[in-house]
Amino acid sequence: MKPPSPGSELDDSPAAALYQQHGPLLFAWLCKQTSSWEDAEDLLLEVFVAAFEYNRLLAVSEEKRLAWLLSVAQHKLVDYYRLASRRQHVSLDAVAGTLEADEALAPEALALRHERHADLRAALQGLPQVQREVVQLRFGEGLRCAEIAAVLGKREGAVRVLLWRALALLRVRCGGDQEGRGRNG
């Protein structure tokens, strides 16, 4: 953390003077106690926030002020290690490999899947009513052709033809066999 720049109106404040006087020493001590520069910087910020919230600190003598700041820094450091022992740390590099491996969760893949679903819903709405019912019963309800025939009061062969024609229309309207699921692909 850098102190306010020279010429700033904050340079004359008691808080700035306190930080400029004791900040570098506390920061150096915290850097030796923590695993990263960023953690030491965060702890230093917490120490000075506590100091500014303690309104009577500026009325205390200089020696006691430094002792109080070191005591707060030590307590913040204990809290830091206590939380670190409870928190599981995973490196970003380890997680990035997992996320890249699962491309189905990528925003682009999700957007394309939503678009394909919308196209399919529109194509389903464009089917004749009886074909839509057959597709719904087969794929929505999981019924076999014989069961669909019994529900609709049609012959099983007629249901198979209706289903085949409905699927052929959906393939045409949704852009064909894009994922290579055809018999020849």
Image: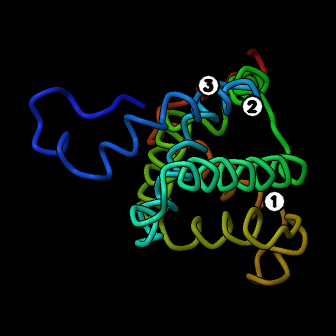
As helix, strand or loop, the secondary structure at mark 3 comes to helix
Of tags 3 and 1, which is closer to the observer? Answer: 3
Compared to residue 174, the image places residue 51 above or below, namely below
Q: Could you tell me which residue is drawn at 66 percent across and 59 percent down?
A: 162
The amino acid on which the numbered mark 2 sits, given as a three-letter code, is Thr
Q: Nearer the viewer, residue 85 or 132?
A: 85
Q: Is residue 181 visible?
A: no
Q: Residues within 10 Å of mark 1 (few under 14, many from 20)?
A: few
Give the mark, 2 or 1, whose residue is nearer the N terminus: 2
The amino acid on which the numbered mark 3 sits, given as a three-letter code, is Ala
Which corner quadrant holds the N terminus? Answer: top left
Compared to residue 143, the image places residue 42 above or below, namely above
- Between the residue at mark 3 and the residue at mark 1, the CA separation in whole angstroms equals 83 Å
Of tags 2 and 1, which is closer to the observer? Answer: 2
Q: Could you tell me which residue is drawn at 74 percent across and 49 percent down?
A: 74
Q: Are marks 3 and 2 in contact (CB under 8 Å)?
A: no
The amino acid on which the numbered mark 1 sits, given as a three-letter code, is Gly
Give the mark, 3 or 2, whose residue is nearer the N terminus: 3
What label does residue 28 carry, if any? 3
Question: Can you identify the residue that label 2 sits on?
Answer: 34
Q: Are marks 2 and 1 in contact (CB under 8 Å)?
A: no
Q: Is residue 153 visible?
A: yes
Question: Can you identify the residue that label 1 sits on?
Answer: 157
